[in-house]
Amino acid sequence: MLKRTLLGLIAIMAMPAIVAQEVDLKIKAEGFGAKPKFKIYIDSDLVELKTNETYIVDQSVNIDKVARGRVILNSGKYGEFWLEPGNVEVTIKKSGFPKSIEVIGSETDNIYKSLKFGKNQAAVEKLIIEKPNHLATLNYIAQYYNRHSYDFLKSLYDKYPLETQQNLTDVKSFLKTAKLEKVKVGSKIFDFEASTQDGTTYNTNDLRGKYLLLDFASTGCAPCWEGYPSMIETMSNYPDVAVLTFNQDNAKEGWNNMAKRFQIELDWPVLWDAENKKDIFKLYEIEGWPIYFLISPEGVVLERWFGAGKSKLKGALKKHITD
């Protein structure tokens, strides 16, 4: 599962509050039929939709900051738009979705989409330089920093005040690790220390002398959950292989609820917290979930693969380990 799918939780930077104001919000849909098969959220609030009317949403919304709207299709595909105080009209078009979402009355939305969907790199970077502190620019940079060169990002980042830099955590981690050697097959692993929900700490360096399976995952990753039962079964045949699951998000309560719902009880530690967590995921180049690394007793990467599945796991283990 790629990070930017619906279940990949994309963090949106918190923005300064403003005095609560009303948004006169009108939303219409084109090409979806009489009963649009999608949901609309304003920040975390589900919006009630009308049917058989010109506007599926026609209401006043109180906001105390610029708010993000999300349109989530039943297929899981989603688009977003940005609301500001005043009159805002949104048209959700099926053709070309999500790029085709049109918003009238929101400068933030206009700037954000110019950055996100801009095809001319020079024009996009010119707009960033012209409006570096605009909410739209900051949110774009927070999500799509890897579209730009190291030198451009470094120059931009260094000009921000410390408070802004502290919000741009992914950018900071990218700049810190961009010129470091990444973990790949045949290379030594990047050793790290991380802890479980109960605070128990594990250090990969302490596992030298035995094989290690690293499972990089996420709470919202459906393939991760689907793969755990077969993973538990397979690893039961390799009791001498250490296993660590490292979740990229921090949704511990959500993970517990999912584990209970699917009746999953892993036989190995699930890691959550690390001082340099973002750096770790950057150095291991985790761009989706699940990603697995089979590590030799000497700390060398033997195999790396993407996606859950009994055959991939069993194949890697049989290739390198006698059960």
Image (cartoon, rainbow, N blue to C red):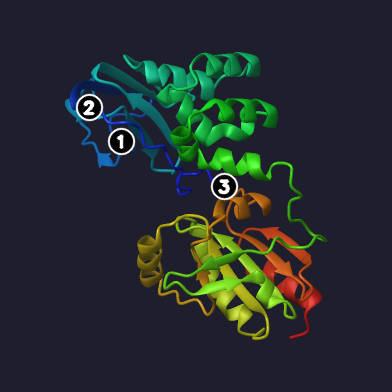
The span from disc 2 to disc 3 (Cα, nearest Å) is: 31 Å
Foreground of the two, 227 or 297? 297
What residue is shown at x 40% (from left), y 62% (from top)?
252
Q: Can the viewer see residue 97 in this picture?
A: no
What residue is shown at x 53% (from left), y 60% (from top)?
274
Q: Position of residue 160 (x, y in %)?
A: 51, 28
Foreground of the two, 310 or 34? 310
Foreground of the two, 96 or 154? 154
What residue is shown at x 72% (from left), y 60% (from top)?
304
> Identity of the amino acid at label 3?
Leu
Looking at marks 2 and 3 on the same chain, the residue that comes earlier in the sequence is marked by 3
Residue 40, labelled with which disc?
A: 1
- Which residue is label 2 attached to? 57
Q: Can the viewer see residue 85 in this picture?
A: yes
The span from disc 2 to disc 1 (Cα, nearest Å) is: 9 Å
Q: Is residue 62 toward the left or the right of residue 283 in the image?
A: left
The relative height of residue 316 versus residue 279 in the rendered view (above or below) is: below
Q: Is residue 305 toward the left or the right of residue 188 in the image?
A: left
- Which residue is label 3 attached to? 2
In contact (CB < 8 Å): disc 3 and disc 1:
no
What residue is shown at x 43% (from left), y 21% (from top)?
134
Looking at marks 3 and 1 on the same chain, the residue that comes earlier in the sequence is marked by 3
Q: Could you tell me which quadrant the C terminus lies in?
A: bottom right
> Identity of the amino acid at label 1?
Ile
Tell me if mark 3 has few (under 14), some (14-19) or many (20+) residues whose alpha carbon lies within 10 angstroms of its own.
few
> Identity of the amino acid at label 2?
Val
Q: Secondary structure at mark 1?
A: strand
